Image (cartoon, rainbow, N blue to C red):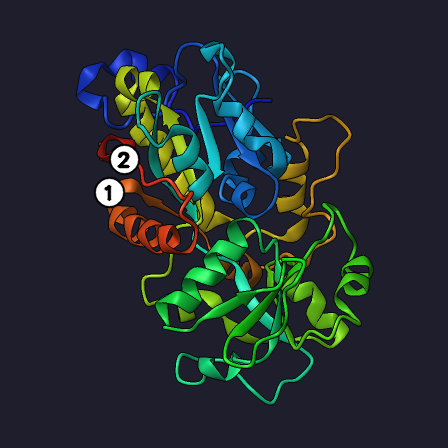
Amino acid sequence: MKKGLWKIGLACLLLGTSFSVACKNKPVDGDITVYMPDGAPALAFAKLLHEDKTEDGVSYFVSNAGSIEEKVTYHDADKNADFCVLPLTQATAKVGDGETYQMVGAVTHGNLYFISKNVDVEYTKENLSTLKGKTVGVLQLGNTPGLIFKSMLLNNGIDYNDLTGENATVKGDKVNLTPIIITAGAKPAQVLSVMEGQGIDLFVMAEPAVTALQNANYKTVGNVQTLYGEEGYTQAVLVAKKTVLEEKTEWVKAFLADVKESAIWATTANKETLVSAVQSHMEVQGADSSLKGTPLTGEVVLRSGVRFESAYICKAKTEAFLQTAKRVENKTVLPNEQFYWLG
């Protein structure tokens, strides 16, 4: 699977070094590999996937989100991805020492929202404390979404009560959190069957599923990103092999500019184009992208937090989130300074 870096071609070779800036996006030697999890992170690369060519020297693979960390942890370094998108906390846990990979930027910045059939209350910082005593169902409570939601509550000085233990009981002075477990590829009707009938007051779900559920009488009643803080948080990051960064620095800079442009393009492309671009690069042949059954529009892509920010731009925001996450979950790994590529 190849992706198309726009090229100036033979003219670059003939015109020489005085036009090196204009020619810096020509293909690199060898075969650069780029891996990303299915879903919102893949949308950041949609334009590059859509314009894929076989001869450009770069290959893209869209992987199952549950196995994406394997792409940076093989003992044989040659098997590992040159570029890989990982959830932030997974990235710091696996490559946070900065010895083999560095973070070059963030590709998603949050896609979590409150949804409820009770639309009488819109949750803001001013009334967030009214969640105390209520039970909130959180998508993947034990993973990144749960960590993000707990961090948001902590930022707002609100205690929570995790209902995952055997003897867990609902408490009136805390926000009670219970996990919503939905299998990959579940249809909206299956999602609803999981959500209904559990005595849950409202749910924290991710786009683009949030928009799909609005067709089932659920409404968005709060934005976790806004509630977290003005700067939001870093969610999925792009890491790159240090060897690639050191040996192909100018090419990398041009590539990252293309990723930024691609994420913007995703907000203007139609659903069919976006899904086709991702589907055609699934790592497992015949596997369906989770995006196939979702209502992808430009607004949904924006609500999915899809945009590229370089590590230089989002470093402070990233470190602030990790410090909060460390207070929620002590296993959260704070990376070394060299984890961030500021080139």
Residue that carries the numbered disc 2 in the rendered image: 340
> For this view, does 105 lie left or right of residue 111?
left
Name the N-terminal-most of marks 2 and 1: 1
At label 2, which amino acid type do we have?
Answer: Tyr
Local crowd at mark 2 within 10 Å, few (<14), some, or many (≥20)?
many
Callout 2 touching callout 1 (CB < 8 Å): yes
Front residue of 251 and 80: 80
Residue 120 in the image: above or below residue 88: below
Direction left: furthest residue: 18
Hey, which quadrant is residue 8 in on the image? top left
Residue 245 in the image: above or below residue 137: above
Q: Residue at x 34, y 56 (%)?
A: 324
Label 2: element kind? loop
Q: Nearer the viewer, mark 2 or mark 1?
A: 2
Q: Dividing the image into 4 quarters, which one contains the N terminus?
A: top right
Q: Residue at x 36, y 55 (%)?
A: 327
Label 1: element kind? helix
* Percent coordinates x, y for residue 209 in the rendering: 66, 59
Residue 43 in the image: above or below residue 54: below
- For the residues labelled 2 and 1, the Cα–Cα distance comes to 8 Å
Q: Is residue 267 visible?
A: no
> For this view, does 82 lie left or right of residue 251?
right
Residue that carries the numbered disc 1 in the rendered image: 312
Q: Residue at x 39, y 66 (%)?
A: 154
Q: Is residue 17 visible?
A: yes
Q: Residue at x 53, y 73 (%)?
A: 175
* Percent coordinates x, y for residue 5 in the rendering: 44, 28
* Percent coordinates x, y for residue 77 in the rendering: 45, 12
Marker disc for residue 64: none
Front residue of 319 and 5: 319
